[in-house]
Amino acid sequence: MLFYVRTLERGRVADAVLAGAFAGLAMLAKYHSAALILALVAHLLLDRKARPLLATPLPWLAALAGVAVLVPHLAWLVAMDFPTVRYAAHQGDSLGRALVSVVTFVPVMVLYSLPAFLFLAAFRRIGDGWPLIAVGQLVRLRETLEGRATLAAMVLPVLFTMALA
């Protein structure tokens, strides 16, 4: 995410290559990171101020760097007959399970985030006038290209995950 935003801001080849390389590394760590990568691609395609970047070599260099990181793993997947894909395919064996997964996703994410909110709340003083979550600041993120990229990275992966569940 950092190097994607830096690519938007500065337009440097090094940032684009690092964005792609880290995206590839994220995929090696967890295939589900594709949801974040897809969110960034959606931002690049849908944001009118980000779209001109497509006319430069930067996104293509990022994609090439990501693929270069993934090539050894892809070769292994093919050689081993896709064991990780077969394992994942056998996990969701019924429609009922899929529906339960969709319904429990949001509450589980809220519970998963609860320790961070409690940590933030521990440093607040009563009457300090600062909200725990500054919703107004989130709304102001829409005003800048980088802010919209951040919002896309926060919201779209959750929506993509729910759609794929």
Image (spheres, grey):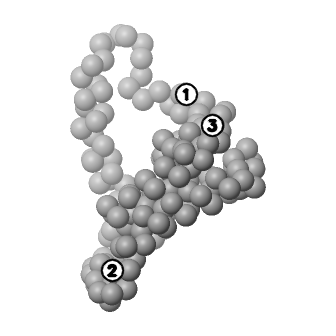
Q: Which of 105 and 58 is in front in this view?
A: 58
Counting other residues with Cα less than 10 Å from the Cα at mark 1, is it few (<14), some (14-19), or many (20 or more)?
A: few
The residue at which mark 3 appears reads as: 9
Q: Are marks 2 and 3 in contact (CB under 8 Å)?
A: no
Residue kind at label 3, given as amino acid type:
Glu
Residue at the limit of the structure toward the top, as seen here? 127
Q: Can residue 46 be seen in this view?
A: no
Q: Which of marks 1 and 3 is in front?
A: 3
At 31% from the left edge and 12% from the top edge, which residue is drawn?
Answer: 126
Q: Can residue 11 be seen in this view?
A: yes
Q: Are marks 2 and 1 in contact (CB under 8 Å)?
A: no
At 29% from the left edge and 13% from the top edge, which residue is drawn?
Answer: 125
At 29% from the left edge and 78% from the top edge, which residue is drawn?
Answer: 84
The residue at which mark 1 appears reads as: 136
Residue kind at label 1, given as amino acid type:
Gly
Locate residue 86, reporting x and y percent.
Answer: 31, 85
Residue 76 disc label? 2
Q: Is mark 2 on a helix, strand or loop?
A: helix
Residue kind at label 2, given as amino acid type:
Trp
Q: Is mark 3 on a helix, strand or loop?
A: helix
